[in-house]
Amino acid sequence: MIGKKMEEMLNKRMNSEFYNSNLYLAMAAWFEAQNLPGLAHWMEVQAGEERGHAMRFYNHIKERRGTIMLSGVPAVPVKYKSPLHAFEEAFNHEVEVSADINKAAEAAGAEKDFATAIMLQWFVTQQVEEEASTAAIVQQLRMAGDSKGGLMQIDHHLGKRKAG
Ligand code: FEO
């Protein structure tokens, strides 16, 4: 059985992961509208992964016989100044997610909820990857600058991302 404090924290994280999924799906739609199908594909895959993250929280709460509390997901931004701006926003968002995951991991330790602490370890590692991947794309887009050819190359490369 999960304690009330962790139940609340994990429900909040579950809802945040659904928000992340919508955030990246909206970015995918924006990239599509800019004729950048590779960047759109990368974000669509990411949106799918974020839904998977939400379901990890859902399953953990359910298996610990907690109550699932789905709240309304706030509206996400739909416009960006440039591809670089979108990926900078994605990177900044992932840094915030990492801080929130760390807080939850700290609370799980303090509550001696070892099952949740172990479940959250996956997320701690995952966040290292999520920050690194978005930071790398920010760097590539910065290097491309105003070069249309550079942007096309990045688009082609990111279009190869495999789901899962
Ligand atoms: Fe599930 Fe990108 O944080």
Image (spheres, helix red, strand yellow):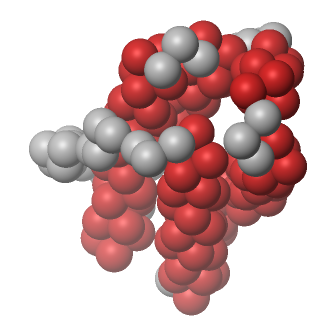
* Residue 73 figure quarter: top left
Viewer-nearest residue: 31 or 106: 31
Seen at 59% across and 17% down, the residue is 36
Q: Residue at x 52, y 43 (%)?
A: 82
Q: Is residue 126 visible?
A: no
In the displayed structure image, the side of residue 129 where residue 96 appears, left or right: left
Relative placement, left or right, of 154 versus 77 is right
Q: Position of residue 15 (x, y in %)?
A: 32, 48
Q: Is residue 38 above or below residue 54?
A: above
Residue 113 in the image, given as x and y percentages of width and height:
56, 71
- The answer to which quarter of the image holds residue 98 is bottom right
Residue 136 coordinates in the image, percent (x, y): 83, 49
- Quarter of the image for the N terminus: give it: bottom left
**Number of numbered callouts drawn:** 0
Measuring from the top left, give residue 146's x and y in whole percent.
Answer: 72, 41
Looking at the image, residue 158 sits to the left or right of residue 20; the answer is right
Q: Quadrant of residue 33?
A: top left
Q: Is residue 127 above or below residue 49?
A: below
Q: Is 14 in front, or is 60?
A: 14
Nearest the viewer among 116 and 81 is 81
Instruction: Answer yes or no: is residue 8 visible.
Output: yes
Which residue does the image show at 76% across and 19% down from the upper left?
152
Residue ranking furthest to the bottom = 110
Q: Residue furthest left?
A: 72
Which quarter of the rendered picture does the C terminus lie within? top right
Residue occupying the point 41% across, 26% down? 30
- Considering only vertical position in the picture, is 14 above or below 156? below
